[in-house]
Image: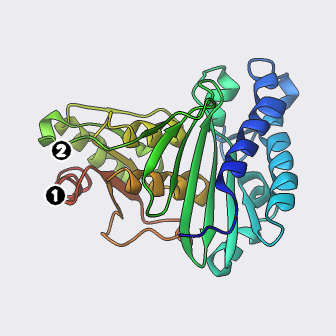
C-alpha cells in the first residue's frame, strides 16, 4: 500500500534522536535528570524529553499534516491521547522505551514509532541504539530486521510449541489483586516467562522467533501499536484478552501475541483463565 510518509526517513529520525539526545546521556544522567511520574518505577529522563522534542520537530518537517502523539507530549497534555482515535494521519512515538532500564544503566531500551492512517496502523519501527539496527514492518509487506549497510532479513515468529515447552514474555505488573496472583501462578505452566521491562525488545524477540508469546495489560499506544504490527507481519496472532482486535484507540483490555490462533486460545485459557 502507499504510505503517507517515507518510512525509511522516519526510521532514520529515530536513529538521529538516539545519536544526538539519548546515547550521550546513557550512564551519564545526573541526579536531577531523572524524575518519577505515576509511581517510583515510572520514570522520565532528560533523554526522553530531549529526544521527543527532536522527533516532534523533525516529523513536523517530514509530515506536516500528521498528528504527533508522543509519550512525553501526552504526559504534558493528557487530552492529546484522545485525539488519536479520530486522526486520519498520526505518528506515535516512544522516545525511550525502557526508561527504567535506561536510567538504571541497563542497555535494553529502544526508540519506537508507528504510523496510523485512517484508523489503521500501517507502519511500525523499533530502533535499537545499542545494536544500531531496526525492526520494521509496513502493513501487508512483512517484517524485517534492517541494518545500516542496507541488509534486510525477513522475520518470522517461532513454530508453535506445547504449553509446557513455551517460552515467553509476560508483564504481570499491571494486573492487580486476585487476577495478578492467578496469572503469576498460571505462568508456572510454561517453560519460562521473562520480563525485560522494555516492550521494544520484547516485540523484537517475538518477531525474531525467539519466544512463543508476549502478554501485556497496560496498553499505551506508543508501547504497542508498532510492535503489534511487526508481530502480525512476522506471522503472529494478536488479540486483546477478550479476543477482540486491537485498535489504536484502545488503552485497556490487555494484549496477547502468540505464534498462531491455537496457541492464543490455549494460553488465554490456561494463563489468563
Q: Is mark 1 on a helix, strand or loop?
A: helix
Q: Position of residue 108 (x, y in %)?
A: 57, 27
Q: Could you tell me which residue is drawn at 58 percent across and 43 percent down?
A: 126
Quadrant for residue 159, please give it. Answer: top left
Q: Could you tell me which residue is drawn at 43 percent across and 63 percent down?
A: 140
Q: Horizontal placement of 233 versus 269: left or right? A: right
In the rendered image, which residue does mark 2 sit on? 160
Lower position in the chain sequence, tag 1 or tag 2: 2
Label 1 crowding class (10 Å Cα cut-off): few <14, some 14-19, many 20+?
few
Quadrant for residue 65, please give it. Answer: bottom right
Q: Could you tell me which residue is drawn at 62 percent across and 67 percent down?
A: 3
Task: Identify which residue, 254 or 83, lies in the foreground.
Answer: 83
Task: Identify which residue, 79 or 7, lies in the foreground.
Answer: 7
Q: Position of residue 75 (x, y in %)?
A: 76, 56
Q: Where is residue 9 in the image (x, y as percent from the top left)?
A: 72, 50
Q: What element carries label 2?
A: loop
Total count of labels:
2
In the rendered image, which residue does mark 1 sit on? 262
Q: In this view, does 233 lie above or below 98?
A: below
Q: CB under 8 Å between callouts 1 and 2?
A: yes
Q: Horizontal placement of 185 versus 107: left or right? A: left
Label 2 crowding class (10 Å Cα cut-off): few <14, some 14-19, many 20+?
some
Q: Could you tell me which residue is drawn at 49 percent across and 71 percent down?
A: 247
Q: Is residue 254 above or below residue 53?
A: below
Q: Position of residue 82 (x, y in %)?
A: 68, 74
Residue at the farthest front position: 150
Task: Identify which residue, 20 or 47, lies in the foreground.
Answer: 20
Task: Identify which residue, 267 or 118, lies in the foreground.
Answer: 118
Q: Horizontal placement of 110 versus 199: left or right? A: right
Answer yes or no: is residue 31 visible. yes
Answer yes or no: is residue 178 visible. no
Amino acid at each position: 500500500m502507499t504510505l503517507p510518509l517515507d518510512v525509511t526517513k522516519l526510521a532514520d529520525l529515530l536513529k538521529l534522536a538516539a545519536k544526538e539526545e539519548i546515547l550521550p546521556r546513557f550512564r551519564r544522567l545526573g541526579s536531577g535528570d531523572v524524575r518519577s511520574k505515576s509511581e517510583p518505577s515510572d520514570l522520565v529522563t532528560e533523554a526522553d524529553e530531549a529526544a521527543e522534542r527532536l522527533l516532534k520537530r523533525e516529523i513536523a518537517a517530514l509530515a506536516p499534516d500528521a498528528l504527533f502523539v508522543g509519550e512525553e507530549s501526552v504526559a504534558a497534555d493528557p487530552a492529546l491521547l484522545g485525539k488519536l482515535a479520530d486522526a486520519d494521519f498520526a505518528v506515535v512515538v516512544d522516545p525511550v522505551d525502557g526508561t527504567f532500564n535506561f536510567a538504571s544503566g541497563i542497555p535494553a531500551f529502544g526508540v519506537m514509532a508507528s504510523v496510523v492512517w485512517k484508523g489503521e496502523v500501517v507502519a511500525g519501527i523499533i530502533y535499537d541504539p545499542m545494536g544500531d539496527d531496526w525492526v520494521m514492518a509496513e502493513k501487508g509487506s512483512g517484517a524485517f530486521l534492517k541494518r545500516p549497510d542496507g541488509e534486510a532479513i525477513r522475520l518470522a515468529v517461532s513454530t508453535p510449541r506445547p504449553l509446557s515447552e513455551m517460552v515467553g514474555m509476560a508483564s504481570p505488573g499491571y494486573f492487580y489483586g486476585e487476577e495478578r496472583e492467578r496469572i503469576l501462578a498460571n505462568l508456572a505452566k510454561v517453560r519460562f516467562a521473562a520480563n525485560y521491562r522494555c516492550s521494544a525488545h520484547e516485540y523484537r524477540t517475538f518477531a525474531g522467533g525467539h519466544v512463543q508469546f508476549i502478554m501485556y495489560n497496560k496498553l499505551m499506544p506508543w508501547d504497542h501499536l508498532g510492535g503489534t504490527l511487526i508481530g502480525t507481519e512476522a506471522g503472529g496472532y494478536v488479540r486483546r484478552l477478550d479476543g477482540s482486535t486491537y485498535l489504536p484507540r484502545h488503552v485497556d483490555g490487555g494484549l496477547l501475541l502468540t505464534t498462531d490462533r491455537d496457541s492464543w486460545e490455549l494460553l488465554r485459557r490456561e494463563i489468563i483463565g
